[in-house]
Image (spheres, helix red, strand yellow):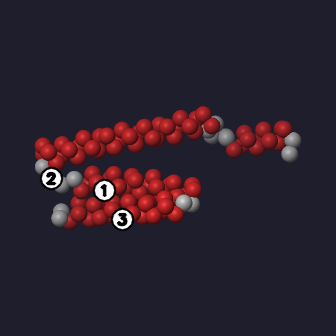
Amino acid sequence: MDREEILSQSRKDNLLLDERDRRIADQASTWGAIGMGAVLVVVFFIRMAIKGGEPYDLLAIEFGYLAAANAYRWSATKEKKSLLVAIMYAVLSLGWLWFYATGD
């Protein structure tokens, strides 16, 4: 493969985003998740300490996020640990959803 073929292939591979744009998108997703988690914690404590009520829906959201993040990690790395953790978080999320739906 000569230089021009390599450059042409690289342009095709990076048609939508270059490495810098991908990195910024990854970091934005990380900071978005941190922000979501922080708001979730605040709402959790407001509900528990001030308003009363059960936080099942909030717990389902958080564990659902963790399940999805670990499922993505598993799809990219095929690490068995990530798959196991994703399944565990998914089960916990479904359990919290069950409690939320049934009101128990």
Vertical comparison of 44 with 67: above or below: above
The amino acid type of the residue labelled 3 equals Val
Q: CA distance from mark 1 to mark 2?
A: 15 Å
Vertical comparison of 29 with 65: above or below: above
- Residue 89: x percent and y percent? 38, 60
Q: Secondary structure at mark 3?
A: helix
Q: Which mark is residue 39?
A: none
Residue position for label 2: 53
Q: Dot 2 surroundings within 10 Å: few (below 14), some, or many (20 or more)? A: few
Mark 3 and mark 1 in contact? Answer it, CB < 8 Å: no
In front of the other: 37 or 11: 37
- Residue 80: x percent and y percent? 52, 63
- Residue 10: x percent and y percent? 73, 41
- Residue 60: x percent and y percent? 31, 56
Q: Is residue 83 left or right of residue 47?
A: right
Residue at (16% x, 48% y) in the render: 48
Residue position for label 1: 60
Q: Dot 1 surroundings within 10 Å: few (below 14), some, or many (20 or more)? A: many
Marks 3 and 1, the one that precedes in the sequence: 1
Marks 1 and 2, the one that precedes in the sequence: 2
Residue position for label 3: 91
Marks 3 and 2, the one that precedes in the sequence: 2
